[in-house]
Image (spheres, grey):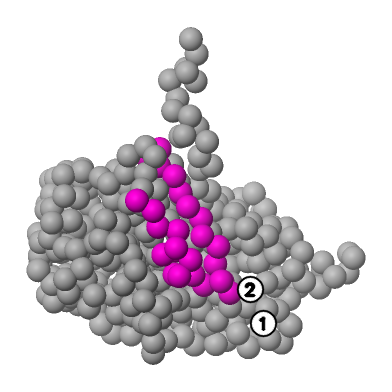
Amino acid sequence: MTMKNLFKSFIQAIKPYQPGKPIKEVERELGIRNVVKLASNENPLGPSRKALWAMRRAIREAHIYPDGACFYLVRRLAQELSVAENQLIIGNGSNEIIELLTRGFLSEGDEVISAEMSFLVYPIITQLCGAKFINVPMKNYRYDLKAIADAVTERTKLIFIANPNNPTGTYVNVQEVEEFLARVPKSALVIFDEAYVDFVEAKDFPHMLFYVKTDRPNLILLRTFSKSYGLAGLRVGYAVAHADIIGYLHKVRQPFNVNSIAQAAATAALDDRFFLWRTKRLVDSGRRYLYRHFKKLGLEYLPSQANFVLVKVGGDGDALCRAMLKHGMIVRPMGGYKLPDWIRVTVGRRSQNAHFVRALRACLRERAATR
């Protein structure tokens, strides 16, 4: 008997999520300096000052176990969102809450539905539970909610909708969501993942928090402090849902799952409204800057409601990303999302966006010269 006999076949079949290399490692490998990373949709402003001050205070008590109930963060979030405290659960990033949902509600043979070009964690965590992931094709790079509703069966337990979607930056509107929710049976949980909600400018974007507050016990809202609040390295996310759902999720949550420094930073970040305004302004102006230059370069792109833009570069997007490394620019190839001739770039500071455009223009010229 070998060790592999102990492995579960449905876990063996998983292709692990591939994070990008750290900036320092790229600089070491290529012998260059001042590399800019615009690959992971992070906030280029970093954390807010209020969050930094809170972290410095909290680190003095790093020898003490964190508050297992995230009491102060839950109380502050409940005030911010105007929901009851028992409608909130905090996770080690919203990824952990996705895992809690799959561990808590899925058994082998159950089904999970989402779109084919959406967050790669959804199918990975579904497979961990031995459940079946249903990939519904997108329509014009957007979630096709009608097709998703058509795909629901008696075995459907979870439906994930990233709105805005990663990596396309597209969204589903109010009318589409209302028609969709009217069709989905109460036996299926509908999870709206709003990691990028703070960057939305669209007037017809659905305010899912309102729907959660109404009598919809099968609706769950996910959000994170990683993007607009600049706390990706601390891993803090949360879910808003009916109290019964939240109470059930606490049964599968590990104790002390969110460290005390992260809790302190997230609580303080909620009070820094000026920082959030700066972040939104930076992203809005940065998107428009990228759009202008993509048009000048004759490149197709998708107008985005998030802090990144998906652009079609033609040919091998992965090869182009490797070429851009030599120009000190890290961006994300999209082959893993079945978009081999597209790349995704995070909106950065003005100087970083300009660096990206220069590197992209140079790499496109180099590629054209070799044809």
282 to 183, vertically: above or below = below
Quadrant of the rendered image containing residue 65:
top left
- Amino acid type for the residue under numbered disc 1: Phe
Q: Nearer the viewer, residue 371 or 5?
A: 5
350 and 367: which one is in front?
367
Residue lying at 71% horizontally and 70% vertically, measured from the top left: 313
* Residue 330 seen in the current view: no
- Residue 11 in the image: state x and y as whole percent: 46, 34
Identified at 28% across, 84% down, the residue is 274
Q: What is the number of the mark on residue 294?
A: 1
Residue extending farthest top = 1
Which residue is label 2 attached to? 311
Could you tell me which secondary element the residue under label 1 belongs to? helix
Classify mark 1: residues with Cα within 10 Å, few (<14), some (14-19) or many (20+). some
Residue for point 36% across, 82% down: 174
Residue 151 image label: none
Going 32% across and 44% down the picture, which residue do you hit?
106
Which stretch is magenta? Answer: 129-154
Distance between mark 1 and mark 2 Cα atoms: 8 Å
Identify the amino acid type marked 2. Answer: Val
Q: Does residue 265 appear left or right of residue 127 in this picture?
A: left
Report if the CB atoms under discs 1 and 2 are less than 8 Å apart: yes
Q: Is residue 276 visible?
A: yes
Q: Position of residue 204 (x, y in %)?
A: 39, 87
Asked if residue 142 is among those painted magenta in the image, a careful observer would answer yes
Provide residue 32's location: percent of width, then percent of height.
Answer: 65, 58
Is 10 situated above or below 161?
A: above
For label 2, the crowd category at 10 Å Cα-Cα, with few meaning under 14, some 14 to 19 and many 20 or more, is: many
Residue 269, percent from left and from top: 24, 72
Classify mark 2: helix, strand or loop. Answer: strand
Mark 1 or 2, nearer chain start? 1
